[in-house]
Image (spheres, helix red, strand yellow):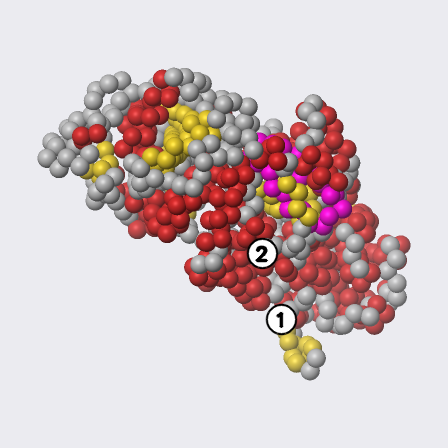
Amino acid sequence: MAELLAKPDTGLVTHLDEVTALGAEIADRLGLSTTLRVKALLACALHDIGKGTIDFQAYIRGQKKKAYPHALASLPFILLAEGRLADYYGWERHRLEATAAVLTHHSPLGPELYKGYEAIAYHPELEQALREIWELLQAHGVRKLPSVEEFWRTVQPLLLNSPAALLEASFSVDGTNKTLRGILQDLPPQDFAQVKAVLHLADWLASAKTPQPSVVFLQGGGAAVKAHMRKLGAPLHDFQRQAQQASRADVLWLRAPTGTGKTEALLLWAGDTERLLYLLPTQATTNAMWRRLRCIYGDDAVALAHGRASYVLRREADEDPLDARLFGSVFARPVTVATLDQYLLAHLNGRHWEERRTLARRATVVLDEIHAYEPYTLGLLLEALERERPARLALASATLPEPLLALFPRGTLVEAEPSLWQRKQHRVELRERSLLEEGGEEALRFAREGKRVLVIANTVRDAQAIYRTLREGGLCPDECFGNEEAPSASTGLGCMDPRANSTTVHHPFHKSVGWGKLELLHSRFILRDRMRKEEEVRCAEPGTIFIATQVVEVSLDISYDVLITELAPVDALVQRMGRVNRQGKDPPAPVLLYCRWSEGAQRVYGRELLEWSREILGDLPEMPTPEDLADATHRLYERVMTTDAWKNELEEGRAALDEIQRILGCYTIDLSDEDLRARFTARRGTVSVEVLPAQFEQEAYRLRETGQGWRLPELLVSVPVYWLRHSEFFAPVPDLRCLRTTLRYDPDSGLETPEKSSGGPPGVFLD
């Protein structure tokens, strides 16, 4: 009779043997206890035994189009085997981590998993396959297995009925009756996660191009970083040397000014770690760090994980990098660069939470730009770290406020040396007018001198207004503002009267030629245009005026000559200032800070926070040092973190993670559940949705028809979900699985708001 197959070209026992051997090595490298190691080996050896059905063997030979779920068909075997070994190894009979891992190795554990499936006929050759599986388990140290004859006889009654019925069968646990499904849900999550992680990693490696566990663990990381430092050619700063010497510290606190080599210090501290998980606030910073670390550790060692990682990886590879996407998404490469969201969503029981949390617990985790998170996100993070602390942890920032540090595990503090804190990189001038009143004129003045000018507004609408005014040569004179009698403009755009906090149309703009070297960047560009703009502003010519929103604060590695910005919280302003004269090699760069904030800025940040920041900024010297800016940030945090609103939001984050984990246990979150979906977020604030501007619809269809559907994200733009109440501008496109919008889109200025496209009243959509 023909051999049982696991794949068209691989025998079932051959595959199980390979997976078990890989699982044994991975379990040892991850430091699993003896009990969990045995359970992991059981799972590896029996996970595909359900392929030994008549149905599956017909499917794998191309005789059927669809097969019975083999993970479900494996359930009776792993359930009986795990139970029979309980007495010898001393685990409780209801501790069924191996059973849960096998059952869920293709589908997440949940309340509806495999409901409704009927019985299945097993292949007559399965008993012989079982003999060989027993031999490979014994070869890897699993003891006291029953004889194959006894086991085969005992499992027969279970094979007569549907394996799915076992999930609803009742078992006694500590005097209480529970279904098997309920027992699996209530397993200790960390133990279940470790067993499933070993099974999944071994199974995936067996199918990968390089089936070696070594590709999952970092080797020679310390040497790679030292080689990188030698290539840079500059001697180590004192703080970098201190970070390297603190490599045995489990927790590191690192405070160093922007542009002084903070990342290198963190990598020197990480040294020869087997796994590095580098977490950042945004996709843009994550992409940049991913490229940077690939140059240090090698392309194959470094993975990328965020919401659009699949697109980025596909775009930069000649073919679909399945292994890179899969291993990166679960933190299984030796080095993973990810957004913090990915780490937190794992702790909220998102897809593949088992692998992510298991590998993160064994990792060196770096939380860079730790100041950048709102209190709700910090609450999630603190709760996650308290429940499952990684092997080593680093917190890093240019400011690293003391009140914020006090929330985290105590660490070894390494600070940049005094000389780096005393650099004078900026000359700050506080202006009592608004950015919209004179920011454009000042930007032009500096640009005409050949300076590269960065202008930052707090809302998309204001950034667009400044851009259009400069592009069209329409700078209104001072007497325009507040002139209620001025005639309406018949051409061009109106200008904002900041004193009235409203948009008022005044006399026609001057017909001077607009400034040619203009760039605009905010969150409402399609991805293709945003990526193009990010590249262009990195290499800006002298005389360029770059107008942006908060997206530049922790997203772009740029260094301009002048900063013109609207008032924002002190920590945000410090980040903005880090985008000019970044290395501190030039004379202090002009920073014009406009202190009359817009209504939109007040909605974004809150009046109290802006007032406190204005007060603190007033105490700064004209040429503040990085130390002055760090002290100013500390002062702001001391105030903000004592407010009831801040503390309540922090506790809401903690409570949300606790509640999700209590509700779900070992289940993966079901995002079709509206209540759970609402809690499954790493950030508070406005929820966004991606839409397709109508002008790109035909291009989207062409991409799909030519096998390039993976490029669809290039044509999407993110908008606040509340915009969808203007239903006349949005409609679903089922074929493309997205929403189309008829809102006007300009590749230079981005997507317009519903108010502009409808001619409705201004002042509603201020983001």
Q: Residues within 10 Å of mark 2 (few under 14, many from 20)?
A: few
Crowd class of label 1 (few under 14; some 14 to 19; many from 20; radius 10 Å) = many
Please report the residue visible at 29 percent of the width from the left and 20 percent of the height from the top. Answer: 514
Q: Along the horizontal axis of the image, is 486 left or right of 716?
A: left
Kind of element beneath mark 2: loop
Residue at mark 2: 407
**Residue 645 x/y as whole percent:** 43, 59
Q: Is residue 181 left or right of residue 636?
A: right
The span from disc 2 to disc 1 (Cα, nearest Å) is 36 Å
Quadrant of the image occupied by residue 102: bottom right
Q: Position of residue 262 (x, y in %)?
A: 62, 36
Residue at the location (84% across, 68% down)? 89
Whether residue 168 is visible to the viewer of this picture, yes or no, is yes
State the residue in front, 662 or 316: 662
Does the stretch in magenta take in 262? yes
Q: Quadrant of the C terminus?
A: top left
671 vs 277: above or below? below
Q: Is 278 in the magenta?
A: no
Image coordinates of residue 260 in percent, x first then y, are: 60, 32
Q: Give the numbered dot on residue 336.
A: none
Q: How many marks?
A: 2
Residue assigned mark 1: 182
- Work out whether mark 2 precedes mark 1 in sequence or the reverse, and give the earlier one: 1
SS type, badge 1: helix
From where the camera sits, is residue 605 visible?
Answer: no
**Res 9 → quadrant:** top right
Q: Which residues are magenta?
A: 246-269
Q: Amino acid at mark 2?
A: Leu
Q: Position of residue 169 (x, y in %)?
A: 65, 74
| Residue at point 73%, 53% (across, down) | 198
Q: Quadrant of residue 339?
A: top right
Q: Nearer the viewer, residue 271 or 619?
A: 619
